[in-house]
């Protein structure tokens, strides 16, 4: 099966989306007749070419990180460019991969519903959405800490190559926890009280010279 992948991360090939796509690919390409081409939505000047590629593809995976409970702006911009093709994508199959910084899969369920509607509007077949929480640390975690998730992605990819469908049991395992347990919520609350929760993100803000602007409200 030929699979066209659109990576919607603003970090392009250096992000967590790339890691997850590669894990999926590892399983998918166990079928030696498999073929995967990845395109980066962050290359905005290439959007017209990407739309042509999408129009020619039979099976398409759109992967992106959750940004403020939805998709990154560049992904929305790309989707908006498909407005002229409503109802014209019959025979095409779309599947999605949405992953989030927060560990709970429930954060991605809203955008999952949107993606299902989007596919229907385009007239394509909806094959499902792979949801994974807790992705921000993937880029820096040692391999042994990500082994279980990698294996699940391998299995999902391999199963997809064989059946052109996503296994609901594997998707459920990957999406765990759907919601944090009361105990884990207590631990998070405690960490946020002592300021541990913000340590990583504050570090990122400082690295990018944006820490002093963190409470800005430009649209007020
Ligand atoms: C601007 C911005 C907004 C984000 N919004 C959310 C969010 O609403 N919920 C969430 O769980 N994670 C959120 N995240 C975290 C990303 O989903 C997470 O870091 C992801 O692993 C980034 O993937 P990438 O490296 O492929 O870009 C946000 C990150 C950024 C930079």
Image (cartoon, rainbow, N blue to C red):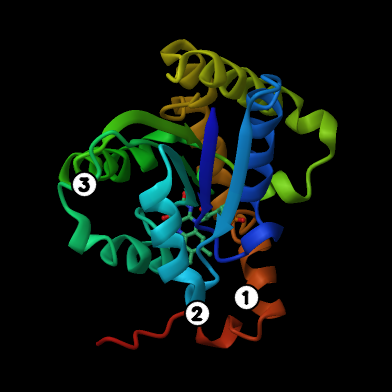
Tell me the SS state at disc 1: helix
Mark 1 or mark 3, earlier in chain: 3
Q: Residue at x 29, y 31 (%)?
A: 126
Camera-nearest residue between 113 and 126: 126
State the image coordinates of residue 43 (x, y, percent, origin top left).
55, 71
* Total number of numbered discs in the rendering: 3
Q: Are marks 1 and 3 in contact (CB under 8 Å)?
A: no
Tell me: is circle 1 under 8 Å from ligand 1. no
Going by the image, does 13 lie left or right of 49? right
Say above or below: 125 vs 18.
above
Q: Residue at x 71, y 78 (%)?
A: 207
Camera-nearest residue between 39 and 104: 39
Q: CA distance from mark 2 to mark 1?
A: 8 Å
Q: Are marks 2 and 1 in contact (CB under 8 Å)?
A: yes
The residue identified by callout 1 is 205
Tell me the SS state at disc 3: helix
Q: Quick one: label 1, few (<14), some, or many (20+) residues within 10 Å?
A: some
Q: Quick one: label 2, few (<14), some, or many (20+) residues within 10 Å?
A: few
State the image coordinates of residue 64 (x, y, percent, origin top left).
48, 51
Whether residue 67 appears in this view of the structure is no
Going by the image, does 202 lie left or right of 131? right
Q: Mark number for residue 122?
A: 3
The residue identified by callout 2 is 214
The quadrant of the picture occupied by the C terminus is: bottom left
Q: CA distance from mark 2 to mark 3?
A: 38 Å
Q: Are marks 2 and 3 in contact (CB under 8 Å)?
A: no
Question: Quarter of the image holding residue 21?
Answer: top right
């Amino acid at each position: 099966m030929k699979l066209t992948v659109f990576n919607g991360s603003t970090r392009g090939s250096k992000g967590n989306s790339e890691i997850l796509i590669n894990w999926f690919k590892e399983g998918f390409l166990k079928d030696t007749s498999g073929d995967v081409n990845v395109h980066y939505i962050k290359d905005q000047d290439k959007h017209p070419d990407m739309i042509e590629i999408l129009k020619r593809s039979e099976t398409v995976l759109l992967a992106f990180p959750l940004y403020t409970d939805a998709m990154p702006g560049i992904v929305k911009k790309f989707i908006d460019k498909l407005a002229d093709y409503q109802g014209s994508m019959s025979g095409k199959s779309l599947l999605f991969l949405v992953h989030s910084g927060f560990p709970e899969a429930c954060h991605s369920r809203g955008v999952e519903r949107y993606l299902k509607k989007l596919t229907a509007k385009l007239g394509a077949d909806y094959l499902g959405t792979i949801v994974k929480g807790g992705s921000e640390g993937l880029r820096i975690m040692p391999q042994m800490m990500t082994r279980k998730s990698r294996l699940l992605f391998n299995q999902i990819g391999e199963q997809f190559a064989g059946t052109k469908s996503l296994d609901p049991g594997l998707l459920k395992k990957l999406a765990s926890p759907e919601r944090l347990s009361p105990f884990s919520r207590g631990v998070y609350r405690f960490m946020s009280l002592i300021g541990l929760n913000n340590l990583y993100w504050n570090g990122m803000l400082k690295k990018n010279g944006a820490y002093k602007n963190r409470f800005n409200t430009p649209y007020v």
